[in-house]
Image (cartoon, rainbow, N blue to C red):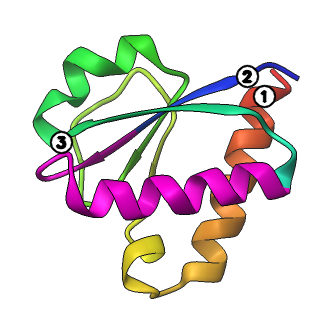
Amino acid sequence: MKKVSVLVACGSGVATSTIAQEAIKGIAQGAGVEIEVHKCTIADIPSQQSNVDVVFTTANYRKPLDKPHLSVFGLVSGVNEAKVKADVAALLKQIAES
């Protein structure tokens, strides 16, 4: 399995992305996937996405992306957290095995 490069983005690039980043690290570890995490603001996604394998956002992002994308607001809010965790783990595994 390859190491997966992850981009975590939020409005400011600081607050909720830090919470999500820590949760994603734990999910990846539990799934047996090695990751490298990068953070940015929502506005920086278009310029940053070429450097990563997958993009996770804590806010709505509806612009087209070249990379797989998943909203992970549930990791911050606790709403549907179990489903979001399962979706993150599945996506990371899929990318790591590709």
Q: Residue at x 22, y 22 (%)?
A: 46
State the residue in front, 40 or 55: 40
Contact? badges 1 and 2 (CB < 8 Å) = yes
Q: Amino acid at mark 3?
A: Ile
Percent of width and height locating residue 88 = 63, 55
17 in magenta:
yes
Q: Which residue is mark 3?
A: 42
Residue occupied by mark 1: 96
Secondary structure of residue under mark 1: helix
52, above or below 23, in the image? above
Position of the C terminus, as image quadrant, is: top right
Mark 3 / mark 1, whichever is N-terminal = 3
Image coords of residue 95 (percent x, y): 72, 30
Where residue 3 is drawn, which disc sits there?
A: 2
Question: Magenta region's main secondary structure?
Answer: helix
Q: Which residues are magenta?
A: 8-30
Query: How many discs mark residues in the rendered view?
Result: 3
Separation of marks 2 and 3 at Cα, in angstroms: 24 Å
Say if mark 3 contacts mark 1, CB within 8 Å. no
Evaluate whether residue 76 shows in this view.
yes
Q: Which mark sits nearer the N-terminus, 1 or 2?
A: 2
**Quarter of the image with the N terminus in it:** top right
Tell me what residue is drawn at x 16 percent, y 28 percent.
Answer: 44
Residue type at tag 1:
Ala
Q: Residues within 10 Å of mark 2 (few under 14, many from 20)?
A: some
Q: Distance between the Cα atoms at labels 3 and 1?
A: 24 Å
Q: Nearer the viewer, residue 40 or 58?
A: 40
Q: Are marks 2 and 3 in contact (CB under 8 Å)?
A: no
